[in-house]
Image (cartoon, helix red, strand yellow):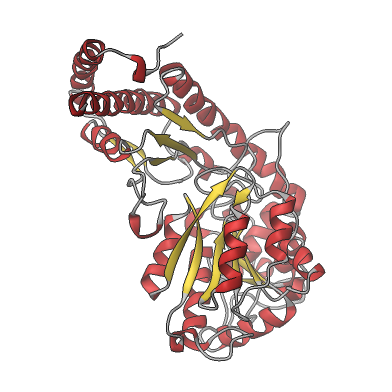
Amino acid sequence: MAQPYSALSTEEIKGKLEKFYQLYKIYQGEDLKLDMSRGKPCTQQLDLSMGMYKVLEDTRDFFSEDGFDCRNYGILDGVPEAKRLFGELMGVPEEQLFIGGNSSLNLMYDALAKFMLLGNARSERPWCREEKVKFICPVPGYDRHFGICEELGIEMINVDMLPDGPDMDAVEALVAQDASIKGMWSVPMYSNPEGTTYSAETVRRLAAMKPAAPDFVLMWDNAYMVHHLEKERRDSLPNILDVCAEYGSEDMPLVFTSTSKISLPGSGLAIMAGSRRTMAYMKKRILAQTIGPDKINQLRHVRFFKDVDGIMAHMEKHAAIIRPKFELVDTMLHRHLDGREIGRWSRPYGGYFVSFFTLDGCAKRVEQLCGDCGVKLTAVGATYPYGKDPHDANIRIAPTYPSLEELQKAMEIFCLAVKIASLEQAARERLAA
């Protein structure tokens, strides 16, 4: 059984550091270039969807089921068969869907930009005319959500993520007392980066909130709704639109998902959904900026996947490729760090990330050590608003892109970096004492 580093003597700390520095120099000499910085599908995953480009071969293939020629202008919110497929997948009536381009992030940015400029369907005035606009951000969370707020001048308020979702006591208290809090980010299933799925109670508490802002919006980014890793353990999530309807708050959520990690990130489909009132308002605003999205790509997706069962079967192929990578990360962390009390990490059942916490004050040093050895990590601090992790502790591990061989090497270096950073801190504390 490994000994906790806190129990080591000063001489033992010094001895281990000397040994680890020698091993580190060997890795430095290998001129490695290993990338664990973003949640990107690997080439093998991308290859799964290449058949999509063979389903439209004849002129007649470019017509939707209602006879519309999808090569032409028109159809703002999606071809009928695509709306039916994704409506069933998301549990949303077809008329409450909008199918856009390839990026749900673009839809989210566009929605908040519209709210800043024009307000939403429940706003008394545009948000830009408010003295201040704030958003609740569960942390650690998704850096690109935070980037949208920062870009638009929306102040961000940290709320801790708990095992069943955001700290709802804190959320409820904040939204009830401050009318400048106009919304909240949520990645409710297999969250980025924790891998947490909100409990049914958390979803109900969110739906039952009584925000001081009458135009409060729950930005519900359900990016990983079908991204299960395990056959035996698949998390489930209540339908936020249905639950909100029970509490009379059906206009509060704006739901997003995409096929970015189902089909092809650069050529997928992004979907937005909400209440009838919300979507009527959003489509009216969108009509001013576009004549319609890429309808041919919508046809490709429908004819390739055919139905929801086809999507789920496809996702099992994805899981077969990336499950061993998540298992390898967990195995390596246990092998190298168990018993040393210098880190903790998530064991997700879906999604794309593993969330690792070093001892407070060590994460940036781990990032530096990994970078100097050719292992690229997500920038430390990115999982918190403004890039500021108050504890300098959280690191997002993205295992999907490297090969298994590359991932093993990267994790060897990562674990060595955690040990070095932790021992260096222990040495400093001993000197200070």
In the rendered image, which quarter is residue 147 located in?
bottom left
Quarter placement of the C terminus: top left
Up the image or down, 54 lies above or below 293; here it is above
| Nearer-the-camera pick, 322 or 141 | 141
Task: Report the residue at 60% width, 46% height from top.
Answer: 190
Up the image or down, 92 lies above or below 345; here it is below
Q: Is residue 57 left or right of residue 46?
A: right
Expressed as whole percent of the image width and height from the top left, the position of residue 337 reads 42, 21
Q: Is residue 330 left or right of residue 376?
A: right
Expressed as whole percent of the image width and height from the top left, the position of residue 174 reads 56, 66
Res 43 seen here: yes
Expressed as whole percent of the image width and height from the top left, the position of residue 143 reads 42, 56
Expressed as whole percent of the image width and height from the top left, the position of residue 266 reads 47, 57
| Nearer-the-camera pick, 342 or 227 | 342
In the rendered image, which quarter is residue 32 located in?
top left
Task: Report the residue at 56% width, 33% height from top.
Answer: 347
